[in-house]
Amino acid sequence: MEKFGGRFPAPSSIAGVYPEIDNVEWTSGFWSGLLWLSYELSGDPIYGEAARAQIADYEHRVDERIATDTHDLGFLYSLSCVAAFKLIGDETARTAALTAADQLLARYLPQAGIIQAWGDLKDPAQAGRMIIDCNLNLPLLYWASSMTGDPEYAAAANEHIKQARTYLVRADNSTFHTYFMDPLNGAPRFGATHQGHSDSSCWSRGQAWGICGFPLVYRHHPDPELISVAARLANYFLNRLPADFVCCWDLVFTDDTAPRDSSAAAIAVCGLLELARQLPLADPDRATYEAAASAITSSLIKSYAAKASDPGDGLLLHGVYHMPNKIGVDECCIWGDYFYLEALTRLTRIWEPYW
């Protein structure tokens, strides 16, 4: 908090140190979420005051449309402003989050039934692209429906998650990172990757977004198929882990020949615990997923968590941001830090997500 003040960490570190940036990246909300979690866990108002001080910045960003031409409005505003409204009832945060939900809804392509990931909606090169990450952005729309009574937000989210389940999940229960739909007639076009090893491989963080996102959407839209698909994705992921249970950056790799992605592992832990929470107590898979989450977390604590004596300011070492572009490889990633703390929170208490 002392270092960043009114600024934010960059998405990934450089030699373990996060550069300081303005609130312009898709990842800003993870820093805010870390502050809100710290406030909840400690009860110390210093964390809540630091997080609340950021609300005006988020209000300005969405009002001025600063780098909001993206589906990542959910990542940004669920962990900052929705969290602020849920925890302390801040009305400015509520208004900013509803404005963000309006901008997210504007990216919905009704003919295709999806929310376009990024880029100009009229750009043919980007038109009709959905990506697996968007599962985590949909809760913002469900929250907006609950706040306003307007079913349009939730209806768009329901359609998107149906298309994600249908087209992003392959027959073998691996996932495409991205899938293109025809925005004019809704016809499916093709699956591809943006950050994975290849179009046919399974990007680990994408699989983790699926494991986490489908059961989080189930909280708002209780379609049993969402739990079924999350379980299938979880099984695929768990069957491809190296010996220390922390995934390589793409699931085509299963041993020490490729860099690990601790951030994907932390997301997967949260997803496994959310999935387990939605299963009946008597379901044997519930205990299996809880045990897997504990095993992955134990490995993160033992071999990937930064020690006080380590240089830098991240919580979780050995993450990967964008391997094809060689950005943030074997570094800290701010979402990895956030999901690591969310995982520890989920493992030690009953916690209601900001999502």
Image (cartoon, helix red, strand yellow):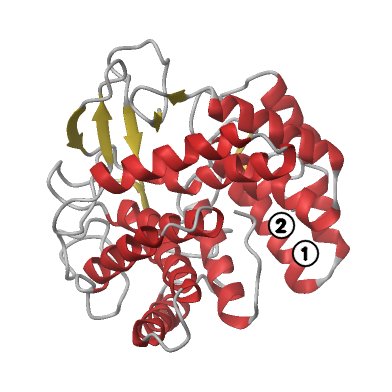
- Image-based side of 274 in relation to 28, left or right: left
- Image-based side of 297 in relation to 168, left or right: right
- Image point (73%, 72%), residue name: 41
Distance from disc 1 to disc 2, alpha carbons, whole Å, reads: 6 Å
Residue 330 in sight from this viewpoint: no
User: How many numbered circles are shown?
Assistant: 2
Quadrant housing residue 148? top right
SS under mark 1: helix
User: In the image shown, does 266 or 346 lie closer to the viewer?
Assistant: 346
Q: Decide: marks 1, 2 in contact (CB < 8 A)?
A: yes
**What's under tag 1, amino acid-wise?**
Tyr
| Mark 1 crowd level (few <14, some 14–19, many ≥20, 10 Å Cα) | some
- Image point (68%, 50%), residue name: 32
Q: Which residue is mark 1?
A: 39
Q: Is residue 123 above or below residue 51?
A: above
Point out residue 71 in the picture as x, y percentages from the top left corner.
Answer: 48, 33
- Image point (56%, 80%), residue name: 347
Point out residue 29 in the picture as x, y percentages from the top left corner.
Answer: 62, 45
Q: Is residue 197 above or below residue 262?
A: above
SS under mark 2: helix
User: In the image shown, does 317 or 100 lie closer to the viewer?
Assistant: 100
User: In the image shown, does 93 or 162 lie closer to the viewer?
Assistant: 162
| Mark 2 crowd level (few <14, some 14–19, many ≥20, 10 Å Cα) | many
Point out residue 132 in the picture as x, y percentages from the top left corner.
Answer: 35, 45
Which numbered tag is attached to residue 35?
A: 2
- Image-based side of 67 in relation to 328, left or right: right
Q: Is residue 82 above or below residue 109?
A: below
- Image point (26%, 27%), residue name: 181
Point out residue 78 in the picture as x, y percentages from the top left corner.
Answer: 63, 46
Quadrant housing residue 109? top left
**What's under tag 2, amino acid-wise?**
Leu
